[in-house]
Image: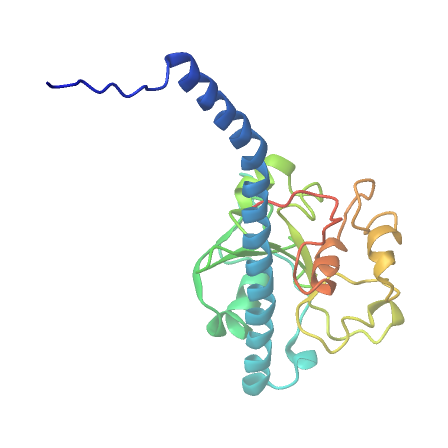
Amino acid sequence: MTFLRFTKGFTLAEVLITLGIIGIIAAMTLPALIQKNNNKVVETRLKKFYSAINQAVLMAENDYGDKKDWYQDLPGAQIGSDGKPIAGSSKQEKWFKTYLQPYLNIVESEILSDGSYVVYFADGGVLRFHNGTTRDCYFYPGKPKKCLEKYGTGFEGSGICQFSFIFYPNSKSATWKYHYNKGFEPYKYLWTGDIERLKNGHQDHSCNKSATSRNYCTALIQMNGWKIPDDYPFKVSY
């Protein structure tokens, strides 16, 4: 005699409930996973940029002598009457291509509408000089236009998708002591050396939501071993 065996399956309601629970869990955990990945990418590219650009400075010193002799504080491109950068007018570009670009893995470069010179590295990181100087510059762990379109060319994106650096090896002033005779360093102008001062010590540069420029955010990450601190006030992106 043959017996038929019936296996009880899930009802449609049970399947829908299970899927709903999975969806809720995913909605709760996915943002955290995405942010964790963002942090990792930003940390890795910041650290790699810092190492690569300063290695380039050392190599340039082998060829051109002391960096304090060949460093120059130069402007970007002039803007024509049509509102576009004038080709060949960027002193930033000429200086960078002479002293640093030969020692870096650069895949592309361009001049933005404000005249600032921008170079793209093979790993996805980007360096942009402030349009008026080769002293102040910004590192972007991803596409700068995405960051600039969202936050503008000012400081709104600082500490989020734009990270401040300074290359100013010449001044012996106490206000520049963390930059004198150095390569490209996270912005530490006027810093006293106290980690807490990076967070709350200066109304413009401190890494907090009420500061205007938030230039100290890069130094805060560096002082934490190039890791985003647990109490970091912003969600970084690239």
Look at the picture and state if 65 lies above or below 161: below
Q: Residue placed at 83% from the left, 52% from the top?
A: 199
Left/right placement of residue 125 relative to residue 190 reads: left
Q: Residue furthest front?
A: 1
Determine the image quadrant of residue 75: bottom right
Q: Residue placed at 69% from the left, 48% from the top?
A: 159
Give whichever of 237, 189 is nearer the camera: 237
Q: Residue placed at 56% from the left, 80% from the top?
A: 60
Q: Inspect this view and state whether residue 91 appears.
A: no
Left/right placement of residue 30 relative to residue 70 reads: left
Look at the picture and state if 12 lies above or below 27: above
Query: Residue 217: x percent and y percent?
Result: 73, 53
Query: Residue 191: x percent and y percent?
Result: 85, 63
Query: Residue 41: x percent and y percent?
Result: 54, 53
Left/right placement of residue 152 relative to residue 195 reads: left
Q: Inspect this view and state whether residue 93 appears.
A: yes
User: Disc count in the image?
Assistant: 0
Look at the picture and state if 160 lies above or below 190: above
Give whichever of 155, 85 is nearer the camera: 155
Give whichever of 14, 54 is nearer the camera: 14
Quadrant of the rendering where the N terminus is positioned: top left
